[in-house]
């Protein structure tokens, strides 16, 4: 008997919906998002859904027994891939060969970034800063700082962009969050893990109304009760902006008490939708009028050195040269807890989102696994 196995990059929440909307699917396998199914998820339609994190840190093994009626039995194990596992010598040698020209030593050579034309002039294993706190964005929904809302890594990078650009607000989209940096040295390659997309940093004038819309759209894009309405990534990091977040509110009403701390030690003041703010964030030549996702009111000033383009990793490196990271407080105060996990696995992003509305259903009985 044949079975239908779907290999998907949609992530756990959407994969569950796909399986429920298509009862002929027997198994869904995915490793695109950051959820981890320590226990298999079984949908109301009987599909088995596995999600094994990202960056090759987990390996899921699903053994199936298939008979005339389809899957008659199954077992599932989620393995952690860590330093206790001996690397394959041949693969390790290939990786070493690829990395050698990027590491300190006689073989290091400068590299041109093919996206933005900047030149990598220092080894990626060079220590560029130090931190006294763990840098990551990975806490579960029931933790003190749920990753879907914020994390020390993103908040630090956004503040570095803000300060180095002399802006009121530093912006970083809520993605590329798999890297963990333990207290101690920060290496350049740690920054590239967070910021691998060849961005420069631009500064532009943005109206306050656009800032308010950004906060609301970001919250709805991660907490909407229908996963198909998610925008990809989690809440954006907006250094210099402090606000309250009500996860249970409806779209357009989740943020309140928004304040902005003006640049260069300026005062913290309520967001004025009619005012203009200097915002720093990702810049690409192909979107010359934008700072991150925001349309600038005039020309965007791009941070350069000697007239040459500078990668965002170098901007953060400059910040770290003058700052030892001792604390990265969250600027978002959420008014209530996020919902507990729907099944036996911890969750980073609530599978139903969060709102007072009914959302997109999981069947009458919810998840069976």
Image (cartoon, rainbow, N blue to C red):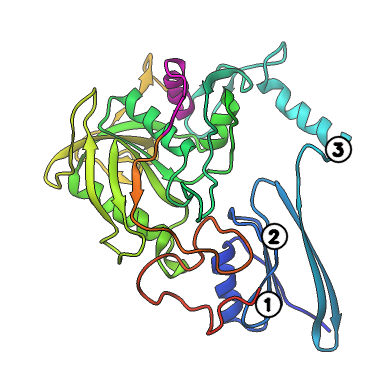
Q: Between marks 1 and 3, how big is the CA–CA gap?
A: 34 Å
Element under label 3? loop
In the rendered image, is residue 221 in sight? yes
| Residue 12 point in image, percent of width and height | 59, 64
Q: Residue at x 49, y 24 (%)?
A: 118
Q: Residue furthest top?
A: 106
Q: Which residue is mark 3?
A: 86
Q: Earlier in the sequence, mark 1 or mark 3?
A: 1
Instruction: Report the label total.
Output: 3
Left or right of 260: which side holds 363? right
Instruction: Give 248 or 261, whichever is nearer the viewer.
Output: 248
Q: Residue furthest bottom?
A: 69
Q: Earlier in the sequence, mark 2 or mark 3?
A: 2
Instruction: Give 56 or 132, whichever is nearer the viewer.
Output: 132
Element under label 2? loop
Please state the extent of the stretch shown in magenta in the rendering.
310-328
Left or right of 327: which side holds 188? right
Q: Which residue is mark 1?
A: 47
Q: Between marks 2 and 3, how big is the CA–CA gap?
A: 23 Å
Q: Between marks 1 and 2, how big is the CA–CA gap?
A: 16 Å
Q: What label does residue 38 carry, if any?
A: 2
Q: What label does residue 342 carry, if any?
A: none
Say which quadrant the C terminus sits in: bottom right
Eyeballing the image, is 118 above or below 353?
Answer: above
Element under label 1? loop
Label 1 crowd bin: few (<14), some (14–19), many (20+), radius 10 Å? many
Q: Is residue 267 magenta?
A: no
Left or right of 266: which side holds 359? right
| Residue 367 point in image, percent of width and height | 59, 75
Q: Residue at x 26, y 61 (%)?
A: 253
């Amino acid at each position: 008997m044949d079975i239908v196995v779907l290999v998907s990059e949609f992530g756990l929440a959407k994969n569950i919906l796909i399986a429920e909307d298509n009862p002929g699917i027997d198994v869904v396998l995915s490793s695109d998002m950051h959820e981890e199914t320590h226990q298999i998820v079984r949908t109301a339609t009987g599909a088995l859904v596995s999600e094994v994190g990202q960056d090759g840190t987990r390996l899921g093994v699903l053994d199936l027994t298939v008979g005339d009626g389809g899957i008659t039995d199954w077992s599932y194990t989620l393995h952690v891939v860590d330093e206790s596992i001996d690397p394959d010598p041949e693969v390790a040698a290939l990786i070493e060969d690829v990395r050698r020209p990027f590491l300190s030593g006689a073989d290091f050579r400068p590299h041109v970034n093919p996206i933005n034309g900047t030149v990598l002039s220092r080894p990626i294993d060079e220590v560029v800063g130090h931190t006294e706190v763990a840098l990551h964005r990975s806490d579960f929904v029931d933790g003190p700082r749920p990753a879907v809302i914020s994390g020390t890594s993103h908040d630090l990078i956004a503040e570095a962009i803000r300060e180095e650009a002399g802006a009121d607000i530093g912006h970083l989209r809520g993605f590329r969050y798999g890297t963990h940096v333990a207290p101690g040295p920060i290496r350049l390659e740690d920054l590239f893990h967070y910021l691998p997309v060849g961005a420069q940093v631009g500064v532009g004038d943005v109206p306050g109304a656009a800032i308010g819309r950004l906060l609301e759209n970001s919250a709805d894009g991660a907490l909407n009760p229908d996963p198909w309405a998610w925008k990809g990534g989690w809440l954006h990091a907006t250094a210099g902006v402090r606000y309250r977040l009500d996860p249970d509110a409806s779209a357009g009403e989740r943020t309140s008490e928004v304040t902005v701390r003006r640049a260069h030690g300026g005062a913290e003041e309520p967001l004025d939708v009619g005012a203009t703010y200097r915002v720093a964030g990702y810049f690409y030549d192909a979107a010359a009028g934008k700072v991150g996702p925001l349309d600038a009111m005039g020309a965007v000033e791009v941070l350069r050195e000697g007239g040459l383009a500078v990668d965002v990793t170098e901007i953060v490196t400059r910040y770290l040269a003058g700052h030892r990271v001792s604390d990265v407080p969250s600027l978002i105060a959420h008014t209530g807890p996020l919902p507990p996990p729907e099944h036996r696995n911890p969750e980073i992003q609530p599978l139903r989102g969060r709102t007072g509305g009914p959302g997109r259903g999981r069947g009458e009985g919810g998840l069976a696994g």
